[in-house]
Amino acid sequence: MLVPLGYDWLSLMLYNAAFELIKDGPLTVQVNGNCMGNLLRNGCRVQLARQRFYLPGDIIVFGRGDQRMVSHRLLGFSPGRHGWIAITQADREARPDAPFSVDRILGKVTAIDGVPVRYPLYRRAWAAVRFIKAFGYLLYRKLRRG
C-alpha cells in the first residue's frame, strides 16, 4: 500500500493506519517535500520497516504533534519526563526538530525508490555531532528558563 507523506487532510487517519499496517511488514510511503535534500526527493517512494533499535544517522519516519508523518534523520535519544525522547533534524535545516516520544516513530527508511539504503559511518558520525550540539542547545534553553 502506498501512503503519501505530508498531506494535512486525513493526516490522523493515515498516521494511525500506517502504524497498523507496518506491524504486518514493510510499508511503502511517498515523500512530499525536499527537507532531506537530494537523498529524499519530492515524490520518491521509501520503504519503511520497524526496527528493534534505531541508530544515529538513520532516516526515520515519525508522527509530529499534528499527526503528520515526517521523514528526518535521527540524531539520538535522551531521557525525558515521561520516557525516552528522540531528537531528529532534516538535512536541510540548521536546527533540530522539537524532541518527541519514541512511541511516535513509525519506522526506518530501508529503501528509496526500490534501492536499499546504506547508512555510511560518516553520516552516523555527523548525526552524533549534531546530537551533541542539539542536546547542548536544548539544555541551555532549559537552564535559561529556570
Image: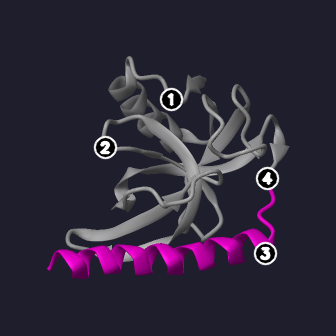
Q: Amino acid at mark 4?
A: Val
Residue 107, which numbered label? Answer: none
Most common SS among magenta residues: helix
Measuring from the top left, give residue 65's x and y in whole percent: 31, 43
* Residue under the point 36% across and 73% down: 138
Q: Residue at x 38, y 25 (%)?
A: 11
Q: Which mark is residue 65?
A: 2
Q: Identify the residue under disc 4.
A: 117
Picture coordinates of residue 44, whole percent (x, y): 73, 30
Spatial CA distance of label 2 from label 3 is: 31 Å
Amino acid marked by disc 1: Gly
Q: Residue 81, percent across and down?
A: 20, 72
Q: Is residue 140 magenta?
A: yes
Mark 3 lies on residue:
121
Residue 74 image-quadrant placement: bottom right
Query: Marks 2 and 4, how far apart in space?
Result: 27 Å
The total of numbered circles placed on residues is 4
- Image quadrant of residue 58? bottom right
Q: Kindly identify which residue carries mark 1.
A: 6
Q: Secondary structure at mark 2?
A: loop
Q: Secondary structure at mark 1?
A: loop
Residue 93, image x, y percentages: 58, 53
Amino acid type at circle 3 is: Leu
Mark 3 in CB contact with mark 4 (< 8 angstroms): no
Of pointers 2 and 4, the one earlier in the residue sequence? 2
* Quarter residue 19 falls in: top left
The CA span between labels 1 and 4 is: 21 Å
Packing grade of label 4 (10 A; few <14, some 14-19, many >=20) is: some
Which badge, 1 or 2, comes first in the chain's sequence? 1
Magenta-highlighted residues: 117-146
